Image (cartoon, rainbow, N blue to C red):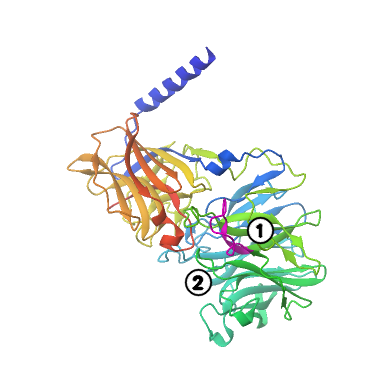
Amino acid sequence: MKAIHQILVFAVAAWLAACATVTPPEDAALFDHFTYIGQDKFYAENPLTAEDVVYNPMLPGWYSDPSICSNGEGDYFLVTSTFVYYPGVPIFHSRDLVNWEQIGHVLTTPGQTARFTGQQVSGGIYAPDIKYNPANKTYYMITTNIATGNFFVKTQDPWGEWSEPIALTQVSGIDPSFFFDDDGKAYIVNNDDAPGYKPEYDGHRTIRIHEFDVATDMVVGEERILIDRGSRPEENPRWIEGPHLYKINGMYYLMAAEGGTGPTEKHSEVIFRSDNPLGGFVPWSGNPILAQYDLAPDRKDPVTCTGHADMVQDPSGAWWAVFLGCRPINGDYENLGRETFMLPVEWTEDGFPVILPKGQPVPMTVRHPGVPRGEKMLSGNFSVTDEFDSSALDMTWLTLRGPATDNYSLSEYPGFLKLTCADALLSQRGVPAAVLRRIQHHGFEASTRMYFRPDAGRQAGMTLFKDEQHYLWFYVGAQDGKPYVALQNIGAGPSDSEPVFTGKFKFIDLKIVSDGQKFAFWYAVDGKSWTLFQETPARPLSTIAAGGFTGTTVGLYAGRL
């Protein structure tokens, strides 16, 4: 009887939802909810058993260029890149390196995200670095805005607001990182061009260092070149970048990525050591300390493109590394982008850290001895539903190049997200009426219910967005007053589909289902059964096909064709 009662309750709830009426404005769509469900086979076939084991990646989906720090009091903080997505630079917190929670974003003001408009999706914010200075109890996040140069922000409360940007005009190049020494001195290391800005080959770069005055927030003195070319300069290594400096047992360690981040390049992580932060760095003879490019491409559950690592020490004295990597399908493509992984660091007899011995694949699960995972995890086959009943967008939502508050509202129609059909298009470099979230699984289902009065000049629906030249828009429009469903294909496979006329409706449900190799687009009118509209291949939205530094996002979009 209890089961029958639950079925009746569900049926009544569904009937009431179908009967509910709301009249959308003429120029906007109203979205009642959005649901995302992860359906990866790996997680389904490999459930976690031991309580101190977690999945890799620790942050699935496009969370690239991770940086991590500790305040020495049991708190760990992690940030990743966001390019031109807004808000910028998500920040995560943990007390045990196992259970993580996003606590906000670092860049949340127009001044902090200046000149995003006009930049392509892979512009904007590159490779943020987060560090804590115990001398003044201040957290620093330093990064590159491709349009304005290198800058940093700071705070004493990482749960709160960060300062406005402090420009570093003397630090050129990209990927700056702070190091606060125990003698009170501070430094910035970064990637820059070849000596004399005259590269001898494509990808010839250097790692440089600047002394930093904490009291004045300024760079002082002359810059110095620490590394020219890379770990094996005689081999002309390419793109040494993403440097981080550490002091461990009285010695200085410089860790950096090499080889380029693309799916066809040889991304890796390398290490150097010196007794002086200003020079004399010697590469470890066994470099790289992390690489996957030399493994069999047909291996099970491959992780590729590993690099851009950072390290942190736990209270037991053990070190852990976070780094980016990709999970390709059939050894070829992926739509998830570069994800954040974590592994324990081992130390060699001659005193160098190794993230993963040569020839070993990145494991898809990791044990943190004696640290139990909680119920709420950021990895695995989770599902989330946003009912749009809050006063602000959930922090997993992103917009492009700005807050987009002129294009959406959560207050005008309580319980609904209102998206105005703006003139700015996804194919342009403005601020469209789009709210997006990362795809975090190869297999997933994303769905929404939309109230909308389309006409020839207004369309709204769901989108899969890689960049301005590669996206899919599953939308509702109208022709001669007759509503229809259609799919616009921008650089993502076959030409636009023929519209399917739906007839008048009160509301329409839209759904995108993926198995990692194709996207299936479904619709249902006024609560009736689902109808498959079309299937398209997933590969055209992948990095190997479209290029760029971001993963694919999914979400809601209203505009004009």
At label 2, the amino acid type is Thr
Lower position in the chain sequence, tag 1 or tag 2? 2
Badge 1: few (under 14), some or many (20 or more) residues near its Cα, within 10 Å?
few
Which residue is at 66% across, 50% downward?
A: 93
Instruction: Report x, y in % for residue 478.
Output: 23, 43
Q: Furthest-left residue in view?
A: 480
Horizontal side of residue 503 vs 65, given as left or right: left
Residue bearing the label numbered 2: 148
Whether residue 184 is visible to the viewer of this picture, yes or no, is no
Name the element at disc 1.
loop
What residue sits 49% from the left and 15% below the top? 4
Tag shown at residue 16: none
Q: For the residue carrying disc 2, how many other residues have a C-alpha within 10 Å: few (<14), some (14-19), or many (20+)?
A: some
| Image coordinates for residue 505, horizontal then vertical, percent | 28, 33
| The residue stretch that appears in magenta | 291-308
Q: Label 1 belongs to which residue?
A: 360
Instruction: Say if 304 sits above or below 393 in the image.
Output: below
Residue 318 lies in quadrant: bottom right
For the residue pair 540 and 251, the one nearer the viewer reads as: 540
Residue drawn at x 64%, y 63% is 309
The kind of residue tagged 1 is: Gln
